[in-house]
């Protein structure tokens, strides 16, 4: 008897279409719509969009600027002095660093390369900074250094993905998406998370480093480009008048609403 009831329940679930679902839960849909309208009425004056309504924390930061400087000198030439690495400069790599590991571009026993920079301590915190950053060394007390981060990724793409999303595999939200998700945005008609890429270059990890992953797409970054079309696909296609473009979009919406 239990199996028969289970099969009937499955059959009903497969037979139910979107239209039937909406017909059978009119009251619930109305309640959801009313709740949405009431929330819009009681929101604070400076909270004018869905991103603010969905924010999980009271916004404190006015803005977040994240610089991902592909091709910049490594931390070993900027902030991390490695005295032992300097001693091993020009010598064969110790086998303890190679045993049991696979590297993509290392064949045989490579030579060690020590740092070229000279390091000193600056500020009240005694932060170590190289001579490559003479101006930065004067503001180290205003900077937070994260020295506990580590990874086994040694290729550019998965390492960049790990840096931006916390995972070397696709599918996780980016740093900017989490910030927008958590703090919201004051913008109603503009994106809360924009991306400025240097020239036409795209990082090795691709556009996934500003993607929203499993979060709604409204939290993904919007790339701004130089030139006449800063944001792609906002203008009508070449040769297509605006009224025809509007009709096409309306037609797609109508098809989407059909069974």
Image (cartoon, grey):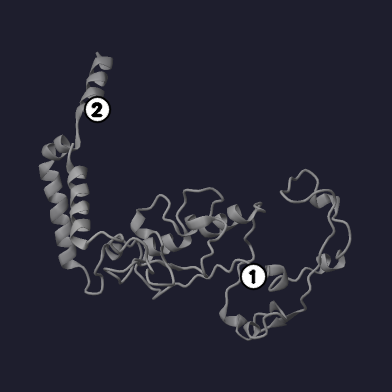
Which residue is more in the foreground, 255 or 177?
255
Q: Does label 2 or label 1 sit earlier along the sequence?
A: 2
* Residue, disc 2: 14
Callout 2 secondary element: helix
**Mark 2, mark 1: which one is toward the viewer?**
1
Residue at horizontal 85 percent and vertical 51 percent from the top: 109
Mark 2 touching mark 1, by CB under 8 A? no
Find residue 235 and name its label.
none
Which residue is more in the foreground, 162 or 231?
231
Q: In the rendered view, does 236 fall on the left or right side of 250?
A: right
Residue at horizontal 29 percent and vertical 65 percent from the top: 52
Image quadrant assignment for residue 243: bottom left
* Residue, disc 1: 72
Residue at the limit of the structure toward the front, as seen here: 239
Callout 1 secondary element: loop
Which residue is more in the foreground, 222 or 41?
222
Image quadrant assignment for residue 58: bottom left
Q: Position of residue 112 (x, y in %)?
A: 83, 61
- How far apart are labels 2 and 1 at the CA level? 55 Å
Residue at horizontal 83 percent and vertical 50 percent from the top: 96
């Amino acid at each position: 008897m239990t199996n028969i009831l289970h099969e009937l329940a499955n059959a009903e679930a497969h037979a139910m279409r979107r239209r039937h679902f909406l017909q059978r839960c009119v009251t619930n849909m109305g309640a959801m719509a009313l709740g949405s309208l009431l929330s819009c009425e009681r929101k604070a004056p400076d909270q004018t969009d869905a991103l603010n309504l969905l924010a999980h924390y009271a916004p404190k930061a006015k803005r977040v600027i994240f610089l991902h400087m592909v091709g910049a000198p490594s931390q070993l030439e900027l902030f991390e002095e490695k005295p032992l690495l300097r001693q091993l400069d020009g010598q064969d790599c110790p086998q303890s660093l190679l045993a049991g590991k696979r590297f993509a571009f290392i064949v045989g026993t490579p030579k060690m390369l020590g740092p070229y920079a000279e390091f000193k301590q600056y500020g009240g915190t005694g932060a170590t900074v190289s001579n490559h950053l003479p101006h930065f060394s004067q503001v180290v007390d205003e900077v937070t250094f994260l020295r506990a981060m580590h990874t086994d990724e040694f290729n550019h793409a998965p390492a960049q993905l790990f840096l931006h999303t916390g995972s070397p595999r696709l599918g996780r939200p980016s740093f900017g998406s989490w910030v927008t998700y958590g703090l919201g945005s004051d913008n109603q008609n503009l994106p809360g998370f924009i991306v400025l890429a240097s020239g036409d270059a795209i990082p090795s990890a691709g556009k996934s480093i500003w993607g929203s992953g499993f979060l709604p797409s409204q939290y993904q970054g919007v790339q701004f480009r130089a030139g006449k079309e800063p944001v792609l696909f906002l203008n009508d296609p070449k040769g297509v008048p605006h009224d025809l473009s509007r009709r096409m979009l309306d037609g797609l919406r109508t098809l989407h609403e059909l069974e």
